[in-house]
Amino acid sequence: MKKIERALLSLTDKSGIEGFARELEQMGIEILSTGGTAKKMRDCGIKVKDVAEFTGFPEMLDGRVKTLHPKVHGGILAQKGNPEHVRQMQAHDLQAIDLVAVNLYAFEKTVANPACTLGEAIENIDIGGPAMLRSSAKNFQDVTVIVDPADYPQVLAEIKATGNTTLKTRFRLAVKVFALTSAYDTAIVTWLKSVDAEANPYFK
């Protein structure tokens, strides 16, 4: 079993991240991050590499494009036991990302405000987060994916014991991802259907 060497943490709900990231760091795991998550960890003295440095490509378009890059998704989706995948990773200088902890822009909280505009709602539709989560969950054979801080203790315990999580744990966590992204998309569709395009000033 390959040991976890690199983690990507990008969180809206940052509860418990300091302790989780600190333990990953103490186990020698490199931490990649973005924006406010990176700042919070640095403020706690935790060493972090910005995703922009990892990819060699800056965040852009007001943060709309941060993690949508082959070095991120290639690092997540590559099957480590597939010789052709390994060859392509080496050819394109891709590094494996073994653990992903992501949660999503708070769309439902945003639209719960009666004053929320369509423009504000649209800006709170997460794109990169669901893409990373689904990539990680699809490749649960090789990637540990976390959407719930309640799973931090078990993940840490397993990594401490063997250097990685068990396949059964990775599968359980992957199922949680698809449940979350399904509910997230349903919330977006439900709210957008409630918008009256004839009366909404966004369309004027």
Image (cartoon, helix red, strand yellow):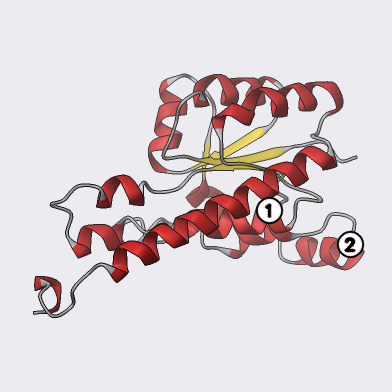
Query: Which of labels 1 and 2 is toward the front?
Result: 1
**Total of numbered circles in the picture?**
2
Residue 94 visible: no
Q: In this view, does 50 lie to the left or right of 97?
A: left
The residue carrying pointer 1 sits among few (fewer than 14), some (14 to 19) or many (20 or more) residues within 10 Å by Cα, namely many
In the rendered image, residue 142, in percent from the top left (x then y), is placed at 79, 49
Mark pair 1, 2: CA separation: 18 Å
SS under mark 2: loop
- Label disc, if present, on residue 137 of the rendered structure: 1
Q: For the point 66% across and 22% down, which residue is it?
A: 153
Residue visible at 84% across and 54% down in the picture: 80
In the image: residue 132, left or right of residue 104:
right
The local secondary structure at tag 1 comes to: helix
Instruction: Estimate the x, y position of residue 120 in percent, counting from the top left.
Output: 22, 57
Earlier residue among tags 1 and 2: 2
Asked if residue 27 is positioned above or below residue 93 in the image, the reply reads above
Q: Specify the label residue 57 is tagged with.
A: none
Dot 2 corresponds to which residue? Answer: 82
Q: Where is residue 8 in the image (x, y as percent from the top left)?
A: 59, 42
- Tell me the quarter of the picture where residue 202 sits: bottom left
Instruction: Please give left or right for residue 50 compared with residue 140 in the image.
Output: left
Rendered location of residue 84, percent (x, y): 87, 68
The C terminus is located in which quarter? bottom left
Residue, x 63% and y 30% (percent of image)?
151
> What is the three-letter code of the residue carrying label 1?
Ala
Q: Does residue 17 show up?
A: yes
Quadrant location of the N terminus in the rendered image: top right
